[in-house]
Amino acid sequence: MSRTERPTVALADLDPLAQLRAGQLARRLPQLLIGLWLYGFAMAMFVRSGLGLDPWDVFHAGLQGLLGVSFGTIVIGVGFAVLLLWIPLRQWPGLGTIANAVVIGLAADSTLALIPPATDWRVSWALLIGGLLLNGLAGGLYIGSQLGPGPRDGLMTGLARRTGWSLRLVRTGLELSVLAIGWLLGGAVGIGTVVYALAIGPLVQFFLPLVMVRLDQPVAEPDELVEPAQC
């Protein structure tokens, strides 16, 4: 490989059963669960920073204010609601998809119970930057376990596959939609929202090759290799 050539990331293109049969589960399962728990931890750090949330979490926070239940409960509920949208797309969730829908919300609520809201701008920025770095690592870990996409990621790729639209267009449309609805419901939009949008892709791209479990299987098309939309 030349110095200017960037390393490629080849995710295995597997159905849910093949994901379990692909081997290395002794590494992949713990990596999946650790990645998802860290993702929920990072999500709570963003909430406590008070500087703004990523688009899906703006939506979650807006619903939380409307329904009056815990943030993690909303994350779990929305995750399973999104999975219902997989049905007309003829997609089947993998083990990682179901775990994603549950573990992140539990981790977020547990962390929110431990970390108080920031009352100083330095603490706010520390939580934001720390949460962003942890989110990038966590995304790399759970995607790299190759046990299925999260509900929201699968919705994006499924819509792109069915409509023929580009993944970038589908992602942008979905995230702008949930961001607008969440903002109208009172979800927190701020500088953190912008920082997340600009930085999370490069961060996941950096971490993913370092932690991905490589499987000797058919690989996904390049336009399907995306960083997590939220979870």
Image: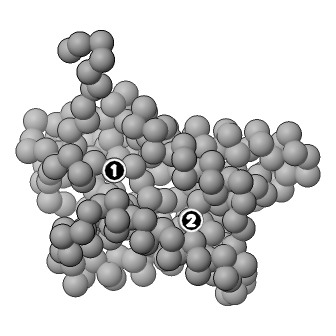
Q: Amino acid at mark 1?
A: Val
Q: Is residue 27 visible?
A: no
Tag 1 secondary structure: loop
Q: Position of residue 199 (x, y in %)?
A: 54, 43
Residue highlighted by disc 1: 226
Instruction: Please tell me the numbered disc located at residue 55.
Output: 2
Q: Is residue 137 visible?
A: yes
Which quarter of the figure is the N terminus placed in?
Answer: top left
Residue 121 location, quadrant: top right
87 relative to 42, above or below: below
Name the residue at 20% across, 38% down: 10
10 relative to 94, above or below: above
Q: Position of residue 125 (x, y in %)?
A: 77, 42
151 left or right, relative to 230: left
34 relative to 9, above or below: below
171 left or right, relative to 218: right
* 3D distance between C-alphas at marks 2 and 1: 16 Å
Q: Amino acid at mark 2?
A: Pro
155 left or right, relative to 78: left
102 relative to 225, above or below: below
In this view, the residue in front, 130 or 202, is: 202
Residue 129 location, quadrant: top right
In this view, the residue in front, 201 or 207, is: 201
Sort mark 2 into few (<14), some (14-19) or many (20+) by Cα contacts within 10 Å. Answer: many
Name the residue at 34% across, 65% down: 169
Counting residues from the N terminus, which is met first, the one under dot 2 or under dot 1? 2
Name the residue at 31% across, 35% down: 212
Sort mark 1 into few (<14), some (14-19) or many (20+) by Cα contacts within 10 Å. Answer: some
Q: Position of residue 166 (x, y in %)?
A: 26, 63
Q: Position of residue 52 (x, y in %)?
A: 71, 59
In this view, the residue in front, 82 or 189, is: 189
Tag 2 secondary structure: helix
